[in-house]
Image: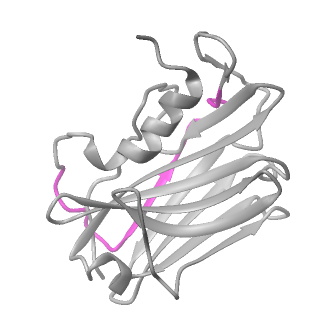
Amino acid sequence: MTRTPLARLAACLAGAALVVAATPALASAADYKHTDASRDAIVERMDAASKARVDRREASVDIRTVRVSHTASHVVVKVRTRAAMPAGRFFLIASLRVPGGRSYELEHIKMLGTTHSQVSTNDEKVECAGYRADIDRGRRLATLVVPTTCLGDPAWVRAGVGVARFAQKRMWADDGLSNHRVGDSLRYSPRIARG
């Protein structure tokens, strides 16, 4: 059975914690930065079985840099795009893997006239009063801040980041740590040790 693009996207978000991958060595510092390829966002029709293709004109979800800082008190994920993030329907997700095989999703979603941000694990919302998502469209920057206590005070994290927008029965998306890669799962950073 062929899954629709939206079903594949939902599987990516909900199943990011279930992807099996080799675990790289610890990053050398509590600060990780990745520069993503420019003009590598993909577009896919949502109303028919279609193949995703690179859309070099798409700039609002074209991730340029991802920076993750891991301190004793917070994990901060900063995502910069090539143009201002969408004003319409879009989502931003940072999936954080921690020791013990657990994953947490930091989400910022603007859909159906509402905007909400939350932390979840295994599709269950995590009560996390200190979580915040700041979208600065003028600076083309999104900042997600989560207290480490909401993540179980992990010794390290691995981060995967994605942004997508929806319009005219199409979805544009970019995996912030993968160049020209289209798939059902996010690519993850090396382990980022707590500083």
Quarter occupied by residue 167: top right
Over which residues does the magenta segment extend? Answer: 24-42
Q: Quadrant of the N terminus?
A: top left
Could you tell me what secondary structure mostly forms the magenta stretch?
A: loop
* Residue found at x 53% / y 80%: 131
Task: Tell me if I can see residue 71 in this picture.
Answer: no
Q: Residue at x 47, y 69 (%)?
A: 119
39 in the magenta segment: yes
The percent position of residue 62, horizontal first and vertical second, equals 67, 40
Up-down relation of residue 156 to residue 123 (above or below): below
Q: Residue 2: within the magenta?
A: no
Q: Quadrant of residue 52?
A: top right
Left or right of 78 on screen, residue 170 = right
Q: Is residue 66 visible?
A: yes
Q: Quadrant of residue 136?
A: bottom right
Identify whether 9 is placed above or below 154.
above
Asked if 188 appears above or below 130 in the picture, the reply is: above
The percent position of residue 165, horizontal first and vertical second, equals 72, 41
Residue 111 appears left or right of 22: right
Residue at 77%, 44% (x, y): give it: 60
